[in-house]
Amino acid sequence: MAVLLGGGKSDALLMAALQYVGEEFMVENDEGQLINDYHALILRRSYQDLAKPNAIMDRCRQWLRPFIETGEVKWSRDTRTYSFPSGATLTFGYLAHDNDLDQYQGSELQFVGYDELTQFTKRQYTYLHSRLRRLKNSVIPIRMRGATNPGGRGHEWVKEKFIKGDIPFIASRYTDNTYLDVEEYGKTLDLLDELDKQQLKEGDWDAELTEGMLINREQLKAALIDPQEYKDWIPVFNVIGIDKASTGDDEFALASLTAFDNGKIVLTNLDGTTSSYPEQLTRDFIETEYLHYKTYVVNFEREPGSDFHYAGKYWNDELNELVTSYGIILKQTPDSNSKFNRARPHARAVKEGKLLFNSDLDLSRLFNQYIYVHPEKQVMKDYPSPDRLDAVSFAYMELTKFIGGAGARVS
């Protein structure tokens, strides 16, 4: 994977896609015919991204124009595919949603390239590995390639897989591009806000937002508490909030909030999964919290539409033995407000020192979600769904009903 703005990463991706289109890579098939069974696919997140002037599809057209004019290379506007004399093809596509993967179900590909990989979900990346295959006597390797900058909705999974993982990546800086006016381009990048500059100019994968519309990172860090500090506190009420995954790459998230007799509230547990089968995790999570804090309510997000009746019955049946044994109440609360507005009350509680976080938990995603959650849907398209934050919201809204109704002191 190649990274960094202005470093020629899209050109490298395009060159890799075109590497094996020549007739010298033709092999004999089972019928004794010589063919080049090489098919490449380059993806952007949306058609608008794909069709921009001088974007990767337009750049390919510029490169291949002499061969198109002679008729050696054919272009199909309908399928966005270049066909070469050898029989090889290069197609440009997009994956705006996980459902768009269906159009590639029957594909047999030898190359898949993602331009701006951090704009894609992890599922959109991993699924297309199943489309990579080749003839048994082919000399052409099967390859999956990505080009991207830090930032975007897929930043965390790309960082985990490529920057922290053992899959090779190549850092390509704008200063490496000999065709750029490096000095002028550097001045342009200096005009970006601090986070964008760290990510796009410096290629810093560890750069993070420090100020959000609800809270800042220092206030979140100030709310950390060691479990040893509250192990002797007396729990008086525990609620688990659950935000159910809406799409394939969203998390099914669970958050446990415990109110103690001294008026403090602690996020005592937090977990999540992108698995389509979260039932066992849910059972284990509820049982653990009940044994420690006597969970009273499990509050599920109730999404709009008629399916919530089915969902409620499903989870009642699934958790029946657990809730019957422990006397736990299952609730569904409508998601009638935005995720931003749902988070406002508990973000305020954090700033006021009323809500604390178990420092033994992995809170990196939750803290990032506190920072980037935004009231405008257009802005939120650039970030993963703040599912862990919303699980805290569903727990907190139910907990505050108890605090208000029981007259519990919150200091």
Image (cartoon, helix red, strand yellow):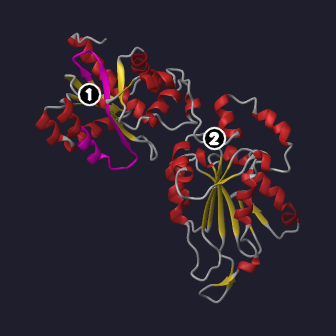
Where is mark 1, residue-wise? 239
Q: Which residue carries the number 2 mark? A: 204
At horizontal 68% and vertical 80% (from top left) the residue drawn is: 35
Amino acid at pointer 2: Asp
Front residue of 167 and 325? 167
271 magenta-colored: yes
Pair 2/1: label in front:
2
Whole-number angstrom distance, CA of label 2 to CA of label 1: 38 Å
Q: Earlier in the sequence, mark 2 or mark 1?
A: 2
Please give the count of numbered marks on the rendered protein.
2
How packed is label 2: few (under 14 Cα within 10 Å), some, or many (20 or more)? Answer: some
User: Vertical placement of 59 versus 374: above or below?
Assistant: below
Relative height, residue 407 to residue 170 (above, below): above
Q: Is residue 250 above or below residue 402?
A: below
Q: Is residue 262 left or right of residue 339?
A: left
Magenta range is 259-286
Quarter of the image with the N terminus in it = bottom right
Residue 75 location (% of width, % of height): 76, 62
Q: Give the residue type that dot 1 points to.
A: Val
